[in-house]
Amino acid sequence: MTLLWPGCRGRERELPVSDERIVAPYQEFENGTLNSYNGSLRKWRLESLYMRKPLGDTGTVLAVPVVLALFDSTGTTTSKILSDSGLTTPAMESFLIWGDVYVRTRENLVVRTERIALDAKTHMWHSDTFVEIHTAKGDVLRGKGFDASESFSTSTFRRSVSGQFPQFRERMEQDDEFF
C-alpha cells in the first residue's frame, strides 16, 4: 500500500521571513526584575513588564513601564519611582526616566514630572521639564528645571517657581518645620 500526501512532493519550502528589520540583535524580557548591588548592599530594584537589552551593549536596559525602588545603606526603601519608560546607562548606575514620572519618598514627598535623570557621579536627580512637588503637609511647589539629592531630601528649582502653602501664617507662628 502506498500513501501519498498532497503538498509533500519534494518541493522546496520557503521559510517565513518577518517584515521587521533588526539593526542589531537584542534580548527581551517579560515580567522581569533587575537588582543592583554595591557589594552586599542592594542599591536599587527595577521591576518592569517589558525589558530590552541590546546584545552589543554592556548594560543599557530599556524598561516599560518602570517601577524603581531605591535603598539606603540599611536596606530601607528611600523612594519609589513609577513611570511609563526608563533606561539605565551601560554601567547600570544612572537612570533616565520619562513619561508621567511619579516619585514617592519615605517622608511622603511626591514629585511629578515628565522626565528625570539620575547622575551617579554626583548622586543627584536632574530634570529640565516642569516639576511639581507635594509635601506631606499639603504644600505644592512648582517650577521648570529641577535638581535634587538622590534621596530627594534637598531640591532646587531653576526657573518659573511658584508654590502654595496652606495655613502659612499659623505654621510660621508655631515655628513649624515646612516639610
Image: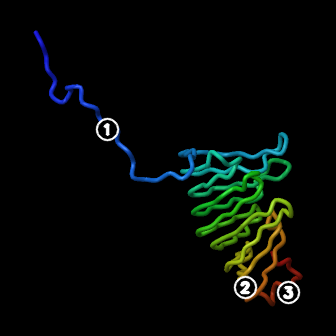
Badge 3 marks a residue whose secondary structure is helix
Residue 170 marker: none
Label 3: how many residues lie within 10 Å, few (<14), some (14-19) or many (20+)? few
Task: State the CA–CA distance, disc 1 to disc 2.
Answer: 71 Å
Task: Write down the quadrant of residue 127 in the picture.
Answer: bottom right
Q: Earlier in the sequence, mark 1 or mark 2?
A: 1
Residue annotated with mark 1: 14
Asked if residue 82 is positioned above or below residue 45 in the image, the reply reads below
Q: Residue at x 64, y 67 (%)?
A: 102
In the image, farthest residue toward the top: 1
Above or below, comparing residue 103 to residue 71 in the picture: below
**How many C-alpha atoms fall within 10 Å of the one at disc 1: few (<14), some, or many (≥20)?**
few
- Give whichever of discs 3 and 1 has the lower sequence position: 1
Q: Which residue is mark 2?
A: 166
Secondary element under disc 1, as helix, strand or loop, is loop
User: What is the three-letter code of the residue carrying label 3?
Assistant: Met
In the structure shown, which secondary structural element does the residue marked by tag 2 occupy? loop
> Which residue is at the front of the view, 90 or 176?
90
Q: Is residue 103 above or below residue 7?
A: below
Which residue lies under the disc numbered 3? Answer: 172
Residue at point 86% right, 77% down? 177
* Left or right, 123 with reference to 30: right
Residue type at mark 2: give it.
Pro
Q: Nearer the viewer, residue 49 or 5?
A: 5
Residue reaching furthest to the right = 175
Q: Which is more foreground, mark 1 or mark 2? A: 1
